[in-house]
Each structure stands twice: as C-alpha cells, then as structure tokens.
Image: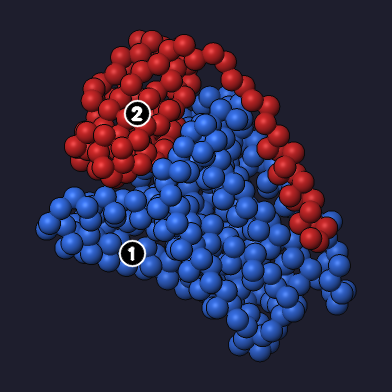
Chain colours: A red, B blue
Amino acid sequence: MSKPLFRLSLVWILGLAPWVASDAQDLSFALTIKDHRFEPSELQVPAGKRFKLVVKNLDPTAEEFESHDLKLEKVIPGGSEANLTVRPLKPGTYKFVGEFHEKTAKGSIVAK
Amino acid sequence: MLATAVIVLREVLEAALVVSIVLAATRGVVGRGAWVTYGIVAGTLGALAVAAFADVLAAAASGLGQEIFNATVLFIAVAMLGWHNVWMTRHGREMAASLASVGTAVRVGDKPLYALSIVITMAVLREGSELVLFLYGIASAGPGQPTELAGGFALGLTAGLMLAVGMYFGLLRVPSKHLFAVTGWMILLLAAGMAAQGAAYLVQADILPALGETIWDTSYLLPDDSVIGRLLHTLVGYTARPYGIQLGFYAVTLTVVLVLTKITPGSTRRPAA
C-alpha cells in the first residue's frame, strides 16, 4: 500500500471508531406491510422522544422503507422485520413510503 | 410501465453518472474500457449476490448489517476516488500534455484504473442490489407482469444511459488542457458527497452521533426526491436536511484529499514513490 493511500485509510479508520451513543429505547411502535400497504397508515407518536420502529413485511417480496422526512431508508426482505431507530421528532407530520410500491405503500408518522 | 421506469432510472442514475465521470477522467488511457467493464460486471454480480442474501445481510450485526454494508461500500469508493486524485497530482500534467499533443490513446504508466474500476463496482453494487430486489418483486407479482418489467427496465435503463452519455460528451467538450482538472474536482465532490452519505447510514445505525439533527432544511425548495435534488445529491452530495456529522465528513474528505494532493510531489518526471 502506498503512503498516501495508507494515510487516507488511516483517516477513515479513525473516523469510524465507534463512540456509540445508545440510550435506552423503551418506546416501540410497529408497522406492518401487507399487500404493499402499511398498517396503520398513520402512526401517532410522542414528540421529542426517541423510539424504536418495528416494520414487519408480511409480503413475500422485499420492500424498501424510505422516508426523507425521517432520514431513514432500509430494505426489508419479504417475510421479515426490521428495527429502525427514530430520533426525537419535533411535532409534525413525517411521511414515509415503500419505495418499491410507492402508489400504495405510503403513510405518515404524526408526532405530538 | 412508467412508474417502473422511474424507479429503475432512480437506481441506475448514480452508477451511470459515476461511470461517465470515470470515463472522462480516463480519456486517452489505454485499456480503460476493459477496466470499466470489469467494474460494471463485478458490481452487477455483487448486486445479484447481495439481493439473493438480502435477508442474511439485513439480519447481520444485530439488524444493522445493511447500514454498515452501505457505509463500507461508500467509504471504499471514497478512498479510491481520493487515491485517484492524489495519483493525478503526480501524473496529471503529463497526461494532459500527451492528450493535447497526440490527441489519441496514450499509455500512461500505472494510472490507477483498478481504483476507478472499484469505484464503479461499488456504485453498481449498492444501487444495483436494490434494483434487483425491486424487479424481482414485480416479476413474482403474477402473470401479465413481464411487459411491465421488461418495458420499464428498458426505458429506465435507456434514460440513465442517455444521461451518462450526455454527461460524458459534455465533459469531452472541456479543452484537453483543463479536462483532468475538471474531472479531478468532480471526483473530489463525488467523494465528499459519498462520505457524507456513508455518515448518514452510520447515524441511522446509531453508530455515529448526528451532531446536529438538521443543520438546514431546503426540502421545500429542492426536495431530496426531485430529479435535480437527486442529480445534485450524486454529483456534489446535496442533502435537503443534513446532519451535522454529514457536513463534518464532507469537509474532512475535501480537506484530506486536497491536502494530500498539495503535499504530493508534483508532476515532473519524478519516479513514482
């Protein structure tokens, strides 16, 4: 490995040193995907609290949970579930979609 | 069919732009076509494998496998792009000179084609695996889908290719003397944007702190999922609502690569270190 490349990798390794910030996640909410729709399509959550979002994909094929509002994107293979951490939200409505079936798979999280 | 095409285009856009920038950056280098092809083929095979084992990947690292994988793929690309720019500091002037005088293919030492080939592999791999899963989903949705699938795929892919070709020929209009300076800056911004995106995956996985939830919000002006938003996202790393740490990764990447190119001995006939 040449010198500049070595230096470059070193910077990245140091940059990636995991100083993990993980606090307790007592709150948890669940969403289900079936027939390319979310159930429920609107989820009420408390504002200002971090919570776990469990998304169960009951369809046989994969879906990509995507939300620019929540800054989340994750592929959920068919018949499996994914855990997402939602960071404390300001009051408001946050949209999400299933990117692979955007016409039907859409919903929102309402933080109050 | 149009809906399918739009998603296909979205997924191939980044890889298409990366390939066109790499092709412009390797103008006049013998053997570049083969390396670009290797990159695309390796990325496609990798994408198929990642899609096939999507459930394994999703379950890995206590459910954070996907985020860590995406971040790693992005950081590998960042390192390779940075390495290319450092290399060009040493040899760029010779390359530009021979390109200007000869105007045709020149063999320029060891231009790190493998590095750019890896960049292409990473770009195709990441978006490609999502595309495979999406298409597989349509294919298994039942009869009557083949037209939707084939038509949408062909249309989306063609649109992506046209964008890439347009970008490539646009770049070739840059005078030879300046071409590598232009591609160098584009590659630098590409790298910084990828680093910022990698950081976002690690925030999502809770491995990195956000250091500021929303530094600015331009989603009303230029949403992430608009066409221009997506183009800018790939080319310069635009994000409508960046985390603080994304700006940090962006700035650090820019700085590190620029500093490395400044302290690397210049482009005269010095032997490679």
Would residue B28 be visible to someone looking at this image? no
Of A71 and B37, nearer the camera is B37
Quarter of the image where one finds residue A45: top left
Identify residue type, mark 2: Val
Q: Residue at x 81, y 61 (%)?
A: A2
Query: Looking at the rendered structure, which numbered label has been put on residue A55?
Result: 2
Do pointers 1 and 2 mark residues of a single chain?
Answer: no
Query: Looking at the rendered structure, which numbered label has been put on residue B157?
Result: 1
SS at circle 2 = strand
Position of residue B230 in the picture relative to residue B64 (left or right):
left
Of A82 and B207, nearer the camera is A82
Question: Relative to residue B212, is residue B99 depicted above or below?
Answer: below
Residue with the most extreme left position: B144
Q: Residue at x 35, y 41 (%)?
A: A77
Q: How dense is the environment of label 1, judged by Cα within 10 Å: few (below 14), some, or many (20 and up)?
A: many
**Chain letter of disc 2?**
A
Question: What is the spatial separation of the Cα atoms under label 1 and label 2, in whole angstroms?
Answer: 31 Å
Q: Residue B38: where, in percent of width, then height? A: 53, 72
Q: Residue A3: where, in percent of width, then height? A: 83, 58
Q: Residue B67: where, in percent of width, then height? A: 51, 39
